[in-house]
Amino acid sequence: MLTLNVPDMSCDHCVSTIERAVKATDSAAVVVVDLSSHIVSIETDRPPADITAAIEAAGYTVASPAGH
């Protein structure tokens, strides 16, 4: 499971955009977003760099992974 901190998520639209970006990279990914803590947890077989790049391409900053 990949856990990322996305500090500039602020609303449900952000959540939807991030979910779509991840699913465009890996349609089988399981994405769980905790908006209040700005944490995105992703179950995926894709490399973390691919997922991070997809979220950044959608316009969001990915901070160092949660817990690091």
Image (cartoon, rainbow, N blue to C red):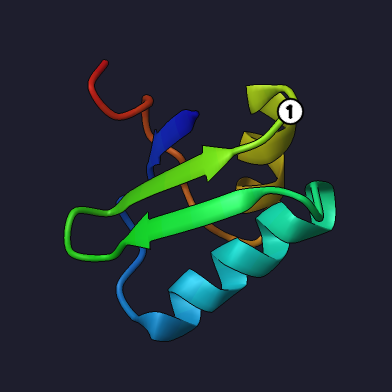
Q: Is residue 21 shown left or right of residue 68? A: right
Q: Residue at x 50, y 30 (%)?
A: 2
Q: Residues within 10 Å of mark 1 (few under 14, many from 20)?
A: few
The x and y percentages for residue 60 are 51, 56
Q: Is residue 16 shown left or right of residue 49? A: left
Question: Looking at the image, which residue sits at the far top?
Answer: 68
Q: Secondary structure at mark 1?
A: loop
The x and y percentages for residue 46 are 76, 29
- In the foreground, 31 or 47: 31
Q: Residue at x 44, y 56 (%)?
A: 32
Q: Is residue 62 shown left or right of residue 35? A: right
The mark total stands at 1
The image quadrant that residue 4 belongs to is top left
Q: Amino acid at mark 1?
A: Asp
| Quadrant position of the C terminus in the picture | top left
The x and y percentages for residue 37 are 18, 54
- Where is 32 relative to 47, above or below? below
- Where is 1 relative to 32, above or below? above
- In the foreground, 19 or 49: 19
- What residue did someone put label 1 on? 45
The image quadrant that residue 49 belongs to is top right
Question: Looking at the image, which residue sits at the far left?
Answer: 36
The x and y percentages for residue 13 are 47, 84
Q: Residue at x 59, y 60 (%)?
A: 59
Q: Residue at x 46, y 71 (%)?
A: 15
